Image (cartoon, coloured by chain):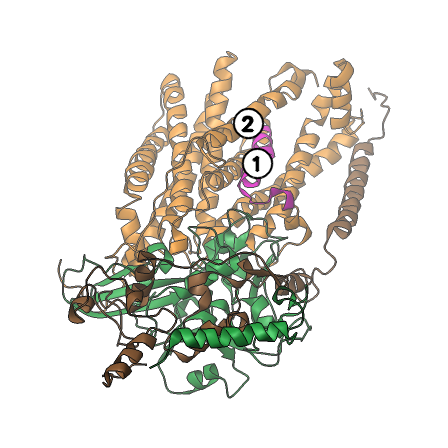
Amino acid sequence: MIDIKKEIQKDRRAFIKNVMSGTIAGSLLMVIPAGAALDQDLPEQLAGIRGDDSPFTKKKFAFVVDVTACIGCGSCCVADKNEYNVPDGNYRTWVERYVIDDHDEVFVDSPNGGLDGYTKPRTDIPYPVRDTFFVPKLCNMCEKPSCVQVCPVGATYKTEDGFILIDKDRCVGCGYCIQACPYSVRFLNPVSKTAEKCTWCYSRVRQGLLPACVNVCPVHARKFGDLNDKTSEVYKILREPHVISVLKPGMGNQPALHYLGLRREVV
Amino acid sequence: MEKKYKSNAYAHVVRLAVVLVVAGGLAVFARGMFLPDTMGQYGHYRGSDLVDQRNVEIRSHTNESCYECHRPIRLIHKAGVHKTVSCEFCHGPYADHITDGKYVAKMPVKRDMEIKTLCLRCHNKIIRARPEESIKVVAMPQHLEEKKVNIEHNCNQCHMVHDPLLWVKAAYDMMGMEMKGDKK
Amino acid sequence: MSAAAHGETIAAVSNYIFPNDLHVHWSLMIVLYPYITGLVAGAFIVSSLYHVFHIKALKPVARFSLLFALAFLICATWPLLNHLGHPERAMSMMLTPNPTSAMAGFGYIYSAYFLVLLLEIIFIFRPVVVALREQATGFMKTLYGVLAIGSDNVSEKSLKLDHKIIAFLAAIGIPMACVLHGYVGFIFGGIKANPLWATPLMPLIFLLSACVSGIAGIIVTYIFLMKISKREIDIECVQTLIKFLWGFFILDFVFEMLELFSHFYMATHHWHTLEALYSGPLFNTFWVFQVGIFSVIPFFLLMIMSLVRFKDSLLLFFAPIVSIMILVQVLLMRWNVVVGGQLMSKSERGATTFHPMWLEKEGILPAILIMIAPVVILWIIGKILPFWMDDDAVKTA
């Protein structure tokens, strides 16, 4: 039997002892000096990027979403909203619920983008359910982005390492890119009045961290990595004989976001 | 019949042409003035935006960042079945807690029914959308009825939130029993 | 509910829209912009029919059409500036236009066309302006001096050159007017993500409806202005305008219906979303109003008015009515395309709703104000330059 209280007390004493003995320099509150790099407390989740100040990484990133693993908890949505202070009613990422009955009718919903999780079952399914699953959605980071094609001023652009970003200081807020995106991942931020979308957490990735949503997913449904790294999980998945698909392939955008186990009912 | 005019026959055309050329020149000059320096450096965009994008504040960290200071919780959480659950999912992003290495604010802690709602976001059997059972799911209040527990009880009265099987395992040990099923 | 046919897995059963598709981003302002540039392009076509194609019957309105076009062109940027999230950055479209973006064309196309129109007006009115300058005093004298480019020379030699320049400007003005409005059509037509918008016919449909709206606008204002100044209306002119209106409207209506019919006939992947749109949210604004009332009725009216010689008073009674109906039809068409296209979600499973409000930034009141502005500007222009060929200022010049 574990005596919980004892465990905590034991460690707490050791901890305080360490502080007193100066092992942890100064007070706990000044452990990390102001303005220091993130290196000290953040693990390097993606190797070979942190500290590289060149304009583009030498990586070929891919994002893989495993639909068979997603449980619809919405942790990814919460993390994303926290990370970017996304205004209510707008979504950089969201999770959809699909319910298919045995008459092949498809019922889709996404209450508040899945931000509060799915707390209620659907009660409007007329026939017995034959299949259900959750589908996370985010920017597809297309190889041939429609949004970049239509931006009149060059405020949204594709980097050499495949990221599609939005220059908040140049965007005029015309909304053309929002009309052009086949996946509806873009929105007009009502506060900054510029276009905004998921960036696969570009600033995190440049620090060698995983995107926020990938980091928090408790069931590892979201995967991110470098296709140039043959030991990476995404490389292995895309090389193995799984059923990998992308959304709306007929559009010709060639998304870099791949889905594992996606059903054809998903649009 | 020839009327005397002050201006040349073509004066107006020449003047217009001059005005247009001067205006054009001014426009080109103005463009040079207002164009951002790094525009077109790598493509049709402002090159310095790449730096701006890299400097976007990172607000969430990883569980490791929380573990750095919160040692007792680390012992329990990292070793338990909830190790893949993000601290920041329940308690909010790192940046709201620490800025520039300094403690900023206390982080929210879920209480009472908030805890139950949060648990059921992942563990609710009634939400019809699992291709197969990847994590343990239960239906409420059936789960409590099965375990012969008062149905008013909250989840964390049996399941320690940072490692939900900690007390359960301890209870089985205490009784000298084996826990059934494959608990991930 | 019957079993869905095998393969019909995208049927819109659940009315699901993507979370970001709830809000309609392009609303009244974006409906107005093509409407205004349409009136400009159409009015210019009327003027060019006289200046380039020498349709003598249109001489009475040839100059007026240019001034009408100018008044509306001045206001064309206002709805766009009102719509932008950052209008102060609007010049970026001129500084760094993205060559792959149809919208980036706006700055240069608009400026170039403005220049052509302005120059054409300056050259055409120069003799009149010179004469007016002689008689004017004070501020007006200076103003006329500027408009005459400081020249008082109206000799045969100078007028001959002017004439050549006018012919040139009127000629290049036609393709430029087509581009001014055609590119707007391409802004929509080039968006593959939107099944209502993505069609090669879109620039053509926009352009033809522009011509139609411009001609109708000229008819209405010509008759109205003649009536309130108690002048004689040139019946031949109105008759000719009606015939051209009918001709252009046939083309416009045919292409609008052809587009829809092609989609219906081929019934490809996206047809079900379009069908749901046209039988649902757009049923009234499209079928009942745009097509039923404001297309079919004017179509037959115009046909009768063109083929049957009416009594003058009857012609002058129906001409403004049918023209106003056409003006409404074109506005409805813009509405149905711009707003209608955004109602369908890209989820292909549902539609959102849109209700314009009176007092919001891009609401009904600003829209009305923006449409009144060109009328006011035209009135101001009328105080400077004579609209009609039989005005005293023109006769004495």
Return the residue at label 2.
C373
**In the rendered structure, does residue C332 fall within the stretch colored magenta?**
no
User: Tags 2 and 1 in contact by the CB under 8 Å rule?
Assistant: yes
Image location of residue B175, percent across then percent down:
23, 82
Q: Residue furthest top?
A: C230
User: Which quadrant does the N terminus of chain B fall into?
Assistant: top right
Question: Mainly helix, strand or loop, the magenta region?
Answer: helix
- Residue at left offset 47%, top offset 19%: C224
Instruction: Using the image as rendered, state which of residue B181 and residue B59 is in the foreground.
Output: B181
Which chain contains the residue that carries disc 1?
A: C
Q: Is residue B84 visible?
A: no
Mark 1 is surrounded, within 10 Å at the Cα level, by few (under 14), some (14 to 19) or many (20 or more) other residues, namely some
Label 1 sits on a secondary structure element that is helix
First in sequence: mark 2 or mark 1? Answer: 1
Q: Is residue C92 visible?
A: yes
Image location of residue B54, percent across then percent down:
63, 65
Colour green belongs to chain: A
Q: Which residues are magenta?
A: C67-89
Colour brown belongs to chain: B
Task: Tell me the amino acid under the disc marked 2.
Answer: Ala
Separation (CA) of disc 2 from disc 1? 10 Å
Colour orange belongs to chain: C
Return the residue at label 1.
C78
Which chain contains the residue that carries disc 2?
A: C
